[in-house]
Image (cartoon, helix red, strand yellow):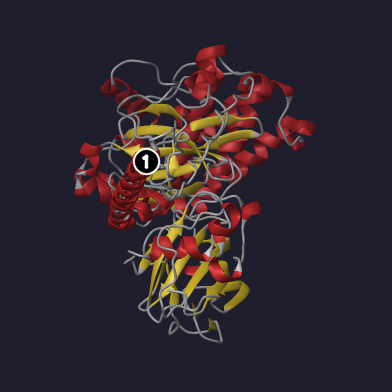
Amino acid sequence: MNHATEAFQPLRADDPPVVAGYRLAARLGAGGMGRVYLSHTQGGRPVAIKVVRPELADDPAFRRRFRREVDAARRVRGAYTAELIDADADGTPPWAATLYVPGPSLTDAVARRGPLPVPAVLWLTAGVAEALQAIHAAGIVHRDLKPSNVLLAADGPRVIDFGISLAADFTSYTATGAAVGTPHFMAPEQASAGDVTAATDVFALGQTAAFAALGRPLYGEGSAVGVLYRIVHDRPDLSLLPEQLRLLFARCLAADPRDRADLAEIVDWCRRRLGTDAGASAGPAVWRDVMGPEPTAPSPLPTPTRVLPRPLVVTQPRTLPAGPGEGRTRRRRGVLLTTAAVAAGALVLTGLAWTVANAGGRFGEWVAGAPSTPGPRESGRSSGQASSSAPEGGTGVSEADGRTPVGAEPSPDRSPSPRVEAQALLMLTPESSLSFRKPFMRDDRKGDIRLDCKSVGCAVESDTSVFVQLFGKSGATLDECRLILARADRHRWTLAAAAAGSEICVQHKNGDIALLVLQTKSTALPDIAFVQLDMTIWRDAA
């Protein structure tokens, strides 16, 4: 669907240019759940953005299921899985971002070149078995393992799409008697709405590997009802498979789940038969032939440049030298023109100032990425561009090119050069907090800034301060923070959009302004989540 070079489709008129702060570079595909797009972190790493169809997003039951999918995917870490980067199950519409895998699906690879040779099937089976070990270790049963959910990367397969995965101890979807999965790759107990366990995924692994070896489903084509009947009542015909693989497939495809091989046994069996090739990091040459040339993803889109309006300058037009008898008339006309120009300029400047003041809140939103959907904004920031401090006095743009940012004029009681304090690598956890007063780091949650991971993605929150995140170039100044904080009213800011180098402006109710620069973020497991921040504080700067 999304891993062959020709699958990079241009965006269409009905595709959004931005999803939660991710600038979309191409369309990767569409399915029953929604559309998938290619985007990038600000560090340039490609990611796949899955956006749920609006009609599904309006279904509360689907949202609950999608939230379970996101929670499940966050618990999975493995060399042969596509890691979840970011998500918002409560967004409008819901979305999720995973690492982009540059390679075709197993379905596409078989359609292009036919059945895979035995060594490639062994590499595939071992890699998918290791992926299932990671999934099961997180207490999850995939439930829908099939060739289209296995992507072939240069260093091995990747298992994706926990669209109907389920925590092993959760109430089964089949409690109402409805089987969930893809008919051609279901296990007998799944097809008959029985108990679904880790052994169910082993059966699907056997069918997926058999598809790779045969070039077609093991239980044949035809209607879903006919295929399900054969899965439940017939023994699979293994005589068509390569002889070296029959014993393994017989163990994986046993009708009784208790008789099936376990995943560790499958990995060991495959690696022993691969022999010396089993240690090759990128797989044998035959695997690379199956995967084909690695597709080149479109480059990241350029980041829009923030432009502050220039003040309007009114100049007096130059007049020609007065001829004889015209001096007095020209001087009188020049005075009138100058007066009119100054009056007009004053009116234009007044109107511009009113327009900028009226648009202050909207400009702040634009600086924060102007997302088309609420919720998390963006999941990557170049770690090499982080700045842990800003110039003293908030000179910013005015010193750089002679322009004064709108709203940067100090109030009569504002200190012309606010006192600056900075702290590096402050560790914030759900049990600690940051304070605007020393000591900046507290071991309890009584400080000004806290980390809350009760919802997906974690967030910073405060009772005393408001937050706004900046997007674009790094190195925010005091004047920039003042500008975007002028209309800020959010006491909670989700970190799903933040990565290394992300910058968040914070204003305390006492007038102090701070710039938080994220250095490290680990929020995949809420129970042990933490972030490391650099903090610069300008005292009495608001």
Observer-nearest of 69 and 169 = 69
Amino acid type assigned to the residue bearing label 1 in the image: Gly
Q: Position of residue 497 (x, y in %)?
A: 45, 53
The N terminus - image quarter: top left
Quarter occupied by residue 397: bottom right
| Residue positioned most to the bottom | 438
Residue at horizontal 72%, vertical 36%? 272
Name the secondary structure under disc 1.
loop
Task: Please count the marks in the image.
Answer: 1
Residue 261 horizontal/vertical position (percent): 54, 41
Residue 200 appears anywhere in the view: no
Q: Would residue 517 be found to the left or right of residue 306 on screen?
A: right
Relative vertical location of residue 29 with respect to residue 82 in this rendering, above or below: above
Front residue of 237/37: it is 37
When asked about the image quadrant of residue 142, the answer is: top left
From the top left corner, tell me how far across and down residue 36 is, in percent.
40, 33
In-image side of 178 versus 123 (left or right): left
Count residues near mark 1 (Cα–Cα under 10 Å), then give few for <14, some for 14-19, many for 20+: some
Q: Nearer the viewer, residue 148 or 74?
A: 74
Taking the spot 53% from the left edge, 30% from the top edge, the residue there is: 151
Which residue, as the protein is rendered here, is positioned at the far front?
A: 325
- For label 1, the residue is 163
Can you say whether 226 is above or below 247 in the image? above
Residue 8: x percent and y percent? Answer: 48, 23
Residue drawn at 46 percent across, 57 percent down: 405
Q: Quadrant of the C terminus?
A: bottom left
